[in-house]
Image (spheres, rainbow, N blue to C red):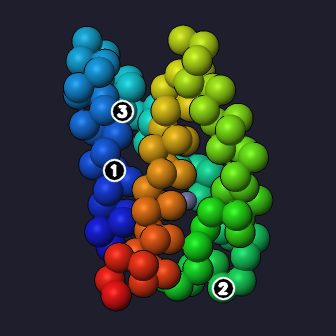
Amino acid sequence: MIHIFLHFLVPAFVAGGFFRRYWVHAYLLMIATMVVDLDHLLASPIYDPNRCSIGFHPLHQPELVLLYLLLCIPAKTRLIGLGLCIHMLLDAVDCQLTSGLWIS
Ligand SMILES: [Zn+2]
């Protein structure tokens, strides 16, 4: 639950902090990148709290993260790239937490 909350909260901070003049636009674009999670629908079960999204779902492959990083460079795709990078970062943090690395 906290994870999903962060997916909405972190882009809000980035939009408010770095794109203050058009933060609504920036925020909505970054939120829109959450559509990458549609690839979860291909998996069964669709949601498994103990599964790491990174490297499992087709749009969460490490080589695609490189592409998402490149999307941050041109101004036109920057917000989409940024949104995707934030998304992958949060998913990766989630993987660390569920793997028990930080808990044990
Ligand atoms: Zn995801």
Q: Residue 8: give its label.
A: 1
Say what secondary structure mark 1 lies in.
helix
Q: Name the residue type under label 1.
A: Phe
Q: Compute the Cα span from label 3 to label 2.
A: 30 Å
* Screen quadrant of the N terminus: bottom left
Q: Position of residue 57 (x, y in %)?
A: 71, 65
Residue 63 seen by the camera: yes
Quadrant of the displayed image that contains ligand 1: bottom right
Residue 78 place in picture, x, y as percent: 53, 22
Q: Residue at x 63, y 78 (%)?
A: 46
What residue type is disc 3 on?
A: Tyr
Number of residues whose C-alpha sits closer than 10 Å to that of mark 3, classed few (under 14), some (14–19) or many (20 or more): many
Kindly identify which residue carries mark 2. 45
At numbered mark 2, what does the secondary structure look like: helix, strand or loop? loop
What type is the residue that disc 2 sits on? Pro
Residue 39 visible in the snapshot: no
Between residues 51 and 29, which one lies in front from this camera angle? 51
Q: Quadrant of residue 64?
A: top right
Q: Is residue 22 above or below residue 37?
A: above
- Badge 1 or badge 3: first in the primary sequence: 1
The answer to whether residue 92 is left or right of residue 69 is left
Q: Where is the C terminus found, in terms of image quarters?
A: bottom left
> On the rendered structure, is 84 left or right of 103?
right
Q: CA distance from mark 1 to mark 3?
A: 9 Å
What residue is drawn where x is 59% and y is 50%? 35
User: Residue 58 at x, y = what percent?
Assistant: 76, 59
Say the numbered circle drawn on residue 27. Answer: 3
Contact check, label 1 and label 3, Cβ < 8 Å: no
Q: Which is nearer the N-term, disc 3 or disc 2?
A: 3
Vertical arrangement, residue 55 with respect to residue 45, above or below? above
Distance between mark 2 and mark 1 Cα atoms: 24 Å
- Look at the picture and state if 94 lies above or below 33: below
